Image (cartoon, rainbow, N blue to C red):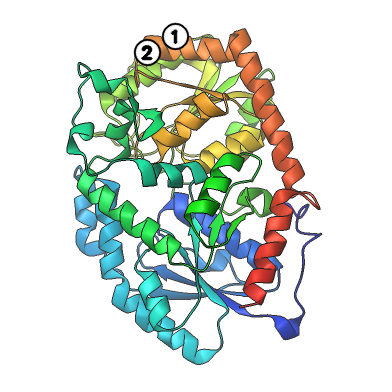
Amino acid sequence: MDQTHVKNSIVQSPETRRRIILFPLPFQGHSNPMFQLANILHTQGFNITIIHTQFNSPNHSTYPHFHFRSINDQFSEVDHLRSTNRDPSFYVKYLNRSCEDPFRNCLIDLLDEEPVACLISDAMFYFTQGIADDLKLVRMVLRTSSLGCAIGYGAVPFSKEGRFNLTKQDPGYEASVPEYPLIKGKDMLKIAVNPEGYGDLVANMLKQMKASSGLIWNTIKELEEPELETINQDFQVPSFTLGPFHKHFPAPSSSSIKQDRDILSWLDTQPPKSVIYTSFGSVARITDLEFQEVAYGLANTSSPFLWVVRPGMVLGFEWIESLSEKFMESVGDRGRIVKWCPQQEVLAHPATGCFWTHNGWNSTLESICEGVPMICSPCFVDQPIIARYAGDVWKIGILLEDGFERVGIAKAIERIMMDKDGEEMRKRVIRLKEKVNLSLDEGGSSNESLKSLVAYISSL
């Protein structure tokens, strides 16, 4: 566990120790940063209670220093629908309805036991603001994506159905969206499969973020300084940018898939900055046609690769059984396919030269923190916005504009691994890495933001 940036922390005395209640959204990209934040706050002298759903329940033994309360989310009643083509907003909105009464009752019981400094809930659990107001409890919000995404969500016209029915032949498909020029019309198709449902979710989330008593962000000021200025203007509550959380306190993986740690020995045998690490996260699913394009895009390069294929990631298949023997023979020892791996260690390994990613915010931050340029294949919700930042704003990645297409994949790999463009991207991402490290040091922006957050909570 990296204690580098904990040693200079403000630690409360036992007399001033107070309890914070945290409520994570039960999906890996949300729960991991919430538990990282919980660890950070615990080192600052706060007692931590986690209220969690039964769905994706955390392993309590992993966090013996926390208290846990489980609530019945009734998610099992709709879990069988997860195999259908429902958009993510369906499940998040369902949880906001089904958790309301159990959460309220749990919170009342906890408040009867001892004083609580504040509640920190995931921003997408927007229903918690009304309950906190009723119980006169301060609610703060953890937003697990970027500042830029929050701004983009406020600007994207979810209500305009035509924007979400574009085809490649439509003029607006490749055109910038007037309300938010960073993204293109085709990005809108990925941001929301169900525009009405996702628009409603986003509107509720943003409204209750503005009604909260403070916003906590897993980012750093130097990475999104213009965006932070905009957020401070639009949201009249304090913002605390104390990321990247995992550099303060790595969180144990919440994945149910066992990590393949043997792959680190294989990486040890590869030349420096030679390996293409490919992983599309814990949720995304792709068709077999897309899967084959990824496979042959990797096979058609000369670079070694490490490819994470999560069980069930390919629609209609258990794992990689649709790959031909010819493919496996042609790749030989140059490629490795695993079900899951210790991503932060892989990105930090000297052999890793590129990260082909879905651009979830956690993965993007981890890549920046290790100075690894990216190939970007966003799948849905905030990922297209983050990918545009990586490619067009920070210029540390290449966005695959045509999706999973083997010729474009091979060209992107060659460009990032062998061309001058790739060298420049690597230099830029290494400069960002250095800024991250400075922000965490004593006097740095994230370190100071953490101190401000501790002082703010202590004053409540």
Q: Quadrant of the C terminus?
A: bottom right
- Residue sitting at x 58%, y 66%: 63
For this view, does 145 lie left or right of residue 372?
Answer: left
Q: Which of 74 and 271 is in front in this view?
A: 74
Q: Is 191 located above or below residue 51 in the figure?
A: above
> How busy is the neighbourhood of tag 1: few (under 14 within 10 Å), some, or many (20 plus)?
some
> Which type of secondary structure does the marked residue at label 1 adopt?
loop
Mark positioned earlier in the residue sequence (1 or 2) = 1
Q: Which of 64 and 233 is in front in this view?
A: 233
Instruction: Kindly report which numbered mark, 1 or 2, lies closer to the viewer in this rendering.
Output: 2
Q: Which amino acid does label 2 sit on?
A: Arg
- Residue sitting at x 30%, y 27%: 185
Q: Is 304 located above or below residue 147 in the figure?
A: above
Count of residue discs: 2
Q: Where is residue 343 in the image (x, y as percent from the top left)?
A: 56, 39
* Numbered badge on residue 406: 2
* Numbered badge on residue 274: none
Q: Do the residues labelled 1 and 2 touch (CB within 8 Å)?
A: yes
Q: Is 72 located above or below residue 113 in the figure?
A: above
Can residue 334 be seen? yes
For this view, does 354 lie left or right of residue 321?
Answer: right
> Which type of secondary structure does the marked residue at label 2 adopt?
helix
- Residue sitting at x 59%, y 14%: 417
Q: Which of 207 and 2 is in front in this view?
A: 207
The Cα–Cα distance between marks 1 and 2, rounded to whole angstroms, is 8 Å
For this view, does 410 lie left or right of residue 268?
Answer: left
Can residue 283 be seen? no
Q: Where is residue 429 in the image (x, y as percent from the top left)?
A: 65, 28
Q: Which amino acid does label 1 sit on?
A: Asn
